[in-house]
Image: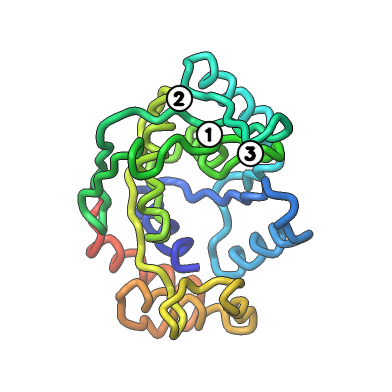
Amino acid sequence: LVAAMASFLDARAHDGVWLVRIEDIDPPRDIPGAGEHIIRTLARLGLASDEPVLWQHDRHEAYQAALDRLIAQGRVYGCACSRKEVAMRFLTTSGTTTFTDRLCGDFTQDVEHEVGDFVLKRADGLWAYQLAAIVDDIHQGVTDVVRGADLLDNTPRQIQLIEALGAQAPCYMHLPLVLNPEGQKLSKQQGATPLDEDDPLGELERAWMHLGFARLGADSIHAFWDAALPLWKSRHAVP
């Protein structure tokens, strides 16, 4: 919710559109109905997508087309652990990749040495997050990405991939993670509880305070967003 809130406010600050994407390209991990539940929950919080929701399970042809394009450029090769298991890897470029994050400042990584050639299509035939996310960012014309700081070190490899596909990297903002008392990222694996659907306004206030703002004390969802937007603009000036 924290990342969704921040990205929604940033889209409004840019007078842009806010997009919802359901990343459901890993069938063994997908829970039936989870995507629909996410969409309904976001709508109750005033976070309805400005454009039709993109479901990644409908995008296999686009991912294959992008992979074929990279293969034709000589930027992809098959890495085999055995004859039955071949994963398609992206050939990274040498040297450093640097970008300026709107919260974290300059970030530099030598992708070739610190990460290495990374997987785009797994040995089991499933698409890797890196390729699917970037292909969809390009397809949807994404100009600004707001997400958790756990993905900060993914960004240089994504920039290399974006550039290889002939597009321009968006602006990035990586937010502090919500942690449990043990300092672990809050997630289902760490026992995080679902959002309280009976208290949507309270959930918004808690997410807002995690972003470093004072409680708004709004009396409705609409009033919350009306009060939050100018405060977000004043703190995070549009670059």
What residue is shown at x 53% (from left), y 32% (from top)?
Answer: 89
Q: Amino acid at mark 2?
A: Leu
What residue is shown at x 48% (from left), y 75% (from top)?
Answer: 204
Apparent side of residue 165 relative to residue 175 in the rendered image (left or right) = right
Q: How is the image coloured?
A: rainbow
**Residue 135's mark?**
1
Circle 1/circle 2 CB separation < 8 Å: yes
Q: Position of residue 39 (x, y in %)?
A: 65, 60
Q: Position of residue 121 (x, y in %)?
A: 61, 35
Between marks 3 and 2 in the image, the one whose residue lies nearer the viewer: 3
Mark 1 residue element: helix
The quadrant holding residue 190 is bottom right
Depth check, front residue: 137 or 150 = 150
Compared to residue 221, the image places residue 19 above or below, namely above
The quadrant holding residue 170 is top left
What residue is shown at x 43% (from left), y 32% (from top)?
Answer: 161
In 3D space, how far apart are the residues under numbered discs 1 and 2 (Cα atoms)? 8 Å
**Residue 165's mark?**
2
Compared to residue 68, the image places residue 232 above or below, namely below
Q: Would you name the residue on which mark 3 appears?
A: 122
Circle 1/circle 3 CB separation < 8 Å: no
Q: Amino acid at mark 3?
A: Arg
Q: Position of residue 163 (x, y in %)?
A: 38, 27
Apparent side of residue 34 relative to residue 11 in the rendered image (left or right) = right
Compared to residue 155, the image places residue 213 above or below, namely below
Question: Dot 1: within a 10 Å radius of its alpha carbon, few (fewer than 14), some, or many (20 or more) residues?
Answer: many
